[in-house]
Image (cartoon, rainbow, N blue to C red):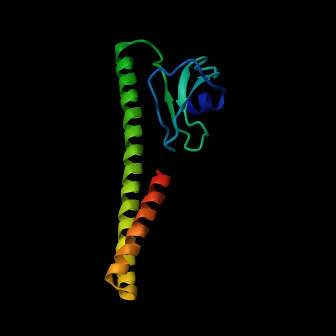
Amino acid sequence: MASASRRSTNGSYSSGNIMGECFCECGLRASLQVSNSIANPGRKYYACPIGRCRWFRWASPSNQRPSIQHSEVADDRSCDFNSNLKLFERVKKLHNDVVFIKLLALFQLFIFGLTFGLKQAYDKLYKLVCFNEMLLYKLI
């Protein structure tokens, strides 16, 4: 039933976000859409904006019973968790990049130390570290 709703949409719904920002499995901000299916006409849902991961979540409960409203809170927490997980993965990747750049700088110090002597190697390494930091900030 979810895939039928996903296929029969009329595009993004632009009047607001019911549950806050949600992110699909691709890490993209999920778009709020409206179903045109027979089973769920006019019902709002979130979906992957490019359809690559086929992520889907209803924006509002099918009826207003309290148990369904708790489900909506759980969906909201799921969206927050999904967002935090993507952020954690990005921070972890950036940390690994920093570690790699530091190891590269240490290797360069060793090579320059063998080639030019310690003072000249330190000066060259300082310039390279400044250049590497500049590149890293451009990546962020």
- Classify residue 38 by image quadrant: top right
Q: Position of residue 77 (x, y in %)?
A: 36, 30
In-front residue for pair 107/116: 116
* Residue 35 sits in quarter: top right
Instruction: Identify which residue, 3 or 34, lies in the foreground.
Output: 34
Residue at 40%, 28% in the rendered image: 75
* Quarter of the figure with the N terminus: top right
Residue drawn at x 60%, y 28% as measured from the top left: 5
Q: Count up the numbered dots.
A: 0
Q: Residue furthest bottom?
A: 115
130 or 5, which lies in front? Answer: 130
- Farthest residue to the left: give it: 118
Indicate the position of residue 53 as horizontal and vertical percent values.
55, 43
Among all residues in the image, which is located at the extreme top? 64
Q: Measured from the top left, where is residue 39 in percent x and y? A: 59, 20
Q: Does residue 128 lie above or below 42 as drawn?
A: below
Judging depth in this view, the residue of 76 and 7 nearest the camera is 76
Q: Measuring 39% from the left and 82% from the top, which residue is drawn there?
A: 112
Q: Position of residue 79 (x, y in %)?
A: 41, 33
Res. 132 image quadrant:
bottom left
14 lies above or below 113: above
